[in-house]
Amino acid sequence: MLDAYFQRINYAGPRQATVETLDVIHLAHASTIPFENLEVLMGSTPRLDLEGIVAKLIEARRGGYCFEHNTLLAAVLKQLGFKVTELGARVRLSGKLLPRTHMCLLVEVEGLSFLADAGFGAELLSPVPLRVGCETSQFGRRYRLIREAHLWVLQRLEPDPTDLYAFTLEPQHPVDFVMANHFTATHPNSIFRNVLTVQRPHPEVRYHLHNHVFHVHQDGQTEARPVRDQAEMGQLLEDFFGIRADSALLALFERFKTTSQES
């Protein structure tokens, strides 16, 4: 699996468990494999077993959401000798109290601890040091972790500090993510049942297809343009996200082309 994974993310570097290896693999993964919920919108619940994730994200060259991305990343890092603990988080972007349906990772290496997360949209390209108040700059964006009672809170600092999600260091088990995945993929109020999102961050630019609008975030500016038809959607998916869409995927365009939701 490792060889196929490294080929998928175009990584040919060292395989020793070091901070540098963690940084480079995290960046390669996050900037290559897109974040997307197309399978959920087509009525399926994504598989969380490693075999199913490998088949989708590596062999079929598709993307996925947090459970898929971070289960794959955790498996790779463990094989390389990193100490990895799977964690659960509550997303805070809506300002509402939401269930704990986000998966992230605690990675320990060379006596240091990091929050790793290759599955939170177009956000983290690199791990964040697990130290209170320590700011990290990632290609034009700054992040930090703060404490709030028993919680750790990940914040994005531009333009103003924004809570992304809150988590504890309590280890989570596969069955915990099975339950969270079921809610995320099937509950009628789940955002992933109601919004089409495909995202891919790069060091210089971040791409985001949100419903029928394609966004390009670069140099502090955002260009947004509506997607005209299924053909254009298919071209965008292939050119910017590496996804070759069949007719069933492209049919999602008709479902979301009239929505006014944008990010």
Image (tube, rainbow, N blue to C red):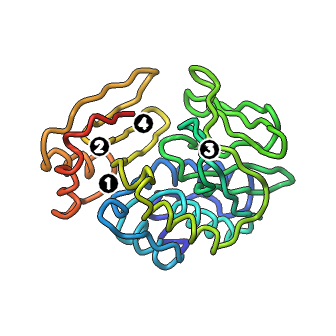
The residue carrying pointer 2 sits among few (fewer than 14), some (14 to 19) or many (20 or more) residues within 10 Å by Cα, namely: many
For the residues labelled 2 and 3, the Cα–Cα distance comes to 24 Å
For the residues labelled 3 and 4, the Cα–Cα distance comes to 28 Å
Q: Does the residue at mark 1 contact the one at mark 4 (Cβ under 8 Å)?
A: no
Q: Earlier in the sequence, mark 1 or mark 2?
A: 2
* Residue sitting at x 29%, y 64%: 42
- Residue sitting at the far right: 111
The residue where tag 2 is placed is 211
The residue where tag 1 is placed is 242
Q: Earlier in the sequence, mark 4 or mark 2?
A: 4
* Residue sitting at x 78%, y 60%: 170
Q: Give 138 or 17, whichever is nearer the viewer.
A: 138
Residue type highlighted by circle 3 = Leu
Residue type highlighted by circle 4 = Arg
Residue 97, numbered label: 3
Which of discs 1 and 3 lies nearer the camera? The answer is: 3
Residue type highlighted by circle 2 = Asn
For the residues labelled 1 and 2, the Cα–Cα distance comes to 18 Å
Q: Give 103 or 19, whichever is nearer the viewer.
A: 103
Which of discs 3 and 4 lies nearer the camera? The answer is: 3
Q: Relative to 236, is 21 above or below?
A: below
